[in-house]
Amino acid sequence: MPMKSFLRTLVLSGGVSLALAGPPPEIAEPLRVLRAVGPEGQGNAAASAAWKKLAAGNASTLVPLLVAMDGANDYALNWLRAAVDAVAGRELTAGHPLPVPELKQFLRMTEHNPRARRLAFELVARTDPATADQLLAGMLNDPSLELRRDAVQKLVDQADQAIARTNPVVAAPLLQSALRSARDVTQIEGIADKLKGLGQPVDLQKHFGFLSEWKVIGPFDNTGNQGFETAYPPELKIDLTAEYDGKKGKVRWQDYVTTHKYGMVDMNQPCGKLKEVTAYATTDVFSNRAQPVELRLGGKNSWRVWLNGKLLFAHDEYHTNTEIDQYIMRAQLQPGRNTLLVKVCQNEEVKEWTEEWEFQLRITDALGTPIVFTRPPCSADGQTIKN
Amino acid sequence: MNLKSHSVNRKAGRVTPRAPFGFLGEVCGAHGVTRPTTALVSGSHFAKAFHAWSLCLLLAASTALYGSDWRRFRGPHGNGAADAAPVPAVLDATNSIAWKSNLPGRGLSSPIIVGDRVFVTCSSGLSQQRLHVICFNATDGAKLWERQFWATGRTMCHEKTAVAAPTPASDGEHIVAIFSSNDIVCLDLAGNLIWFRGLGRDYPHASNSLGMTSSLLIAGGVVVAQVESQSEAFTAGLELATGMNRWKITRSRGPNWTSPVLLQTGGAELVALQSARGIVAIEPATGQTVWSYTNKTSATPSSSLNGSTLLVPSQGLTALGFGSGEPVPKQLWRSGQLNPGTPSPAVLRDKVFALNDGGVLTCGNAATGERLWQLRLKGPFSASPVVAGQFLYCVNEKGLAQVVDTTKPEGEVVSELDLGETVLSTPSIAHGAIYFRSDGRLWKFGKS
């Protein structure tokens, strides 16, 4: 709750006078109104009036605005962010100081909203760039992706300097440390390239945590892209011993292990290079506890994903573009076995660049850290116990 | 930087390099604004003579009436044409530049100009998840305010485009900006946030992994947002005052990068929505279809308005006459020789200009579709041409701006300016000036 976080901020900020003063009463109600905005413009009319009150505040309101971001939805975050911009911009233009000690205190409290903390960092940097740069040194494992990225980049820069001095002994550990902390995909790939240049190649499939062992079945018909909406038997029940009528005859589940650098599951391999078809892939992951996760999928084909029989999301688009973590789905893992099912479709296009019929999938925390799953429990003869 | 201006030796067909922009002035203050110095840079006799000629043009231009605001993609008429003609014919590094300012992020969106303010959108940060709306003083290029937002929808797009691809729109009191993530923000001219919508969060299936580019249109107190992709396609009419849905209509699924065009017909306003399947004209107040044209139509260049004729990129260019009281538009002509590529066609009175990606500019008779002349420009092009007076302004992807005198029998390039940066954005014209933007810079040439 924002007020609870705010009180905690007050307590932990000790003798910081501005924070101890707390939010003036006239701010509390506008903050509540902004936090109440929701989907489809819900609350916009009231928020517009409340925003003007907040935007008229002075520098002492910046930390309360940032604290109010804790637990706020994505719509409210933007209203609050714009208010911070307005207040900070006006104060800086007028030559007024920003409350740097309070902002630094807020920044140090990692339980606050990561985006709010990054914003606090940038406000500090606008006033005192040297201090902000020093703060980055302690942020290698920060919950803010942007702060962490900048902290990692400092290590990479040091490594680059060592490489320029032809000193790989110094560079390699710096890069390994950077790799452990990095979560931004582009940054990880850059670090891996440098390590490869130093003779220390990175297993990127393992590093990113792509799921590599699957059971696949197909092809089923997708003529006229109708297969995307058609619930073939694997959608109704996953029976790994079953045999079904597919587009080209009987089909059954096959083992499939991807060795692709980025974990691509290529349906052309088990099913053949076909058009207007669809196929399924399933795998189990074992979680030692209930936990929130993100399922991160990439691919150029239409797809659907189910977790434990529940449809998480679907996207009906073919052969446009792909990248790691292209689609991110929030989900909850249950303790023990969790069954994933992916449906991936191929359309009618015949150009060479439309041959791809594939996807990649990994499970991470909210920052992109791959989840390490426990091994499934086994019986004495080594057979996996079903649960 | 490699910024060079050129004036074209028309007799010899040669291009004379001029002073690089780096000599023009110095960065002023914290805004990164650069203003020109008054010193002329030495050059060839021809270049000096050309300077004098351009100064005369500037003086002549200054006596003309100022044009109007430029409040949306491709200007007040939705066809790239400015209302008046005081824009310099010679874009150069010494006489015609007013200022340049730095931008904090990428963008293909055009600047819009409302009175003495210029508004630009940018995207920056990890996965371009930061969305910027920036207001500059049109007189000196100083940044007046900036607001940032965090994308709530998908920001993935092709590397050639950017999340800040669509152009914002204004009714003169509000600035409404949309991004590829389908986030829409409405601000007043002073930067006060009026409303925020996360259409990408509200309707998460409507996204395109290559990026969304349809610009906004404001009509009758409604913001028209075309959000069309393979996975889901709709057009929404949002209340300008609150951002709430007034209407939302389902559209044919398919990738669509075109922008709506405002039609004036019998005192009423209609909005033409383009897709690969044709044109649908709707009432902005209700979203109700008034008429439709069904034919294979491009999903990249947008249609252009010429009075009561809509020039549609369909099988070349197809002219649809509307507003005659007929329930359906009448096909006036079709020309396969007028075939726009990525750039949308521009219209100037009796002429239409189609520019293909490679740089072939074709001028046609807007009333008949007859091809009048062709001119090969230096391509490739993504930005749409814009036109003021007798001059057509085309900027290629390498940042080479080329000014074409459209009154010459075969068209003629009268000046060139190398901005030295990739430019994919359509220029904007307002109040006697033309604006260009790249991923890092905003330039103003003309009246300051």
Image (cartoon, rainbow, N blue to C red):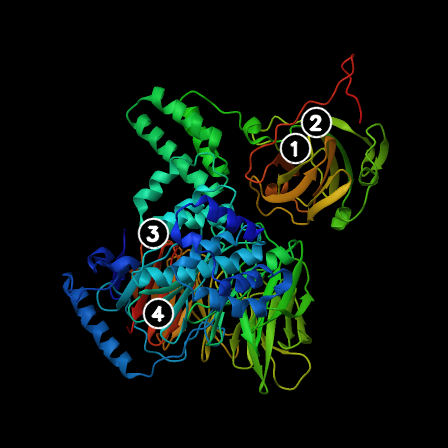
Q: Residues within 10 Å of mark 4 (few under 14, many from 20)?
A: many
Q: CA distance from mark 3 to mark 1?
A: 46 Å
Upstream in sequence: badge 3 or badge 1: 3
The reply to whether discs 2 and 1 touch (Cβ–Cβ < 8 Å) is: yes
Labelled disc at residue B434 = 4
* Residue occupied by mark 2: A256
**Parent chain of label 4:** B
Relative to A291, B383 lies left or right: left
- Residue B425 image position (x, y, % from top left): 43, 60
The label on residue A265 is 1
Q: Position of residue B438 (x, y in %)?
A: 38, 57
Q: Secondary structure at mark 1?
A: strand
Mark 2 is on which residue type? Tyr
Residue A140, given in percent of the width and then of the height, sits at: 44, 34
Identify the chain of the residue marked 1, using the numbered disc in the image: A
- Chain ID at mark 2: A
Q: Position of residue B351 (x, y in %)?
A: 45, 76
Same-chain check, marks 2 and 3: yes
> Which circle, 4 or 3, is nearer the viewer?
3
